[in-house]
Image (cartoon, helix red, strand yellow):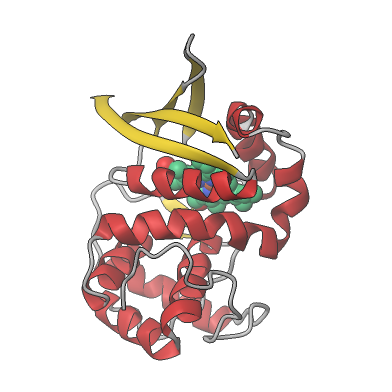
Amino acid sequence: MPWAVADQGIDATPACHGRDRHHRTIVDETRATAGRYPHPESKPVYGLVNRAIEDLVCSRFGADAWQAICRRAGIERPSFVGMQPYDDAITYSLVAAAAAELQTEDAAVLETFGEHWMTYTVEEGYGDLLSMMGETLEQFLDNLDAMHGRIQAQMPALRPPHLRREPLPDGDSILHYHSDRPGLAPMVVGLLRGLARRFDVEVETSRLPPVGTGHERFLLRVRRR
Ligand code: HEM
């Protein structure tokens, strides 16, 4: 089954486990597996991200696929709590395992994940926050740092990227993306696709050559429908 297909029923009901089942013992076991993925500069990432990966896999490929991905990633009893930070090595392992299991590239998983994030966060209660961040895609992009800042109030260990839109004279924009996490630029491409859908516009995104370590740029051409 193809992975990076935008219209495969993103918001289907998750097949894996109830969203509200938070069990401390299992969480601790999930955390314990983090040590299996030594990562020289590992940083915390909130469980909400891992849960979103689970939701994406389960809604499109079913619970068996999710179990296989977790096994491949070395996570025996997966149960992530949204508001709890985990080692980001777990997230990277899940992405790599999903790509291997579903016979695609890590970049395709990240792109599809980025798109899914825009609907998943609404389902998880962030819809009002998203709605406050602008009436156009451009306004929204201008407020991304402020938005992550608001989220940081609830998630103190959050290490969000820094995103800045540079308007160009012809109406296009360059989106600057600064992150201390390597390899996540394809997620931004997917996020932009999800945002285009949210704002009912067409966005042509081209990844420009990186400026330096941790600084990526995307040329954006927005067309109103
Ligand atoms: C209300 C919606 C959103 C929530 C709740 C949210 C929250 C988060 C969380 C929890 C992380 C993981 C980082 C960590 O735990 O330290 C993250 C990472 C990230 N977010 Fe957001 N976010 C939202 C919307 C967006 C949007 C609209 C964008 C658009 C570009 C975006 C761009 C990113 C990127 C690129 C990362 C990857 C981390 C990195 O590059 O260093 N997020 N966000």
Residue at 64% x, 78% y: name it: 19
For residue 8, above or below residue 156: below
User: Is 94 on the left-hand or right-hand side of 57?
Assistant: left
- The x, y position of residue 27, in whole percent, is 51, 76
Q: Nearer the viewer, residue 77 or 118?
A: 118
Q: Which residue lies furthest to the front in this view?
A: 225
- The x, y position of residue 139, in whole percent, is 65, 28
Residue at 60% x, 26% y: name it: 142
For residue 174, above or below residue 47: above
Quadrant including the C terminus:
top right
Quadrant in which residue 156 is drawn: top right
User: Is 161 on the left-hand or right-hand side of 32?
Assistant: right
User: Is 148 on the left-hand or right-hand side of 204?
Assistant: right
Q: Which of 224 and 192 is in front in this view?
A: 224
Quadrant including the N terminus:
bottom left
Question: How many numbered circles does the render carry?
Answer: 0
Q: Can residue 139 be seen in this view?
A: yes
Quadrant in which residue 195 is drawn: top right
- The x, y position of residue 11, in whole percent, is 59, 71
Residue at 58% x, 50% y: name it: 197
Q: Nearer the viewer, residue 149 or 211?
A: 211
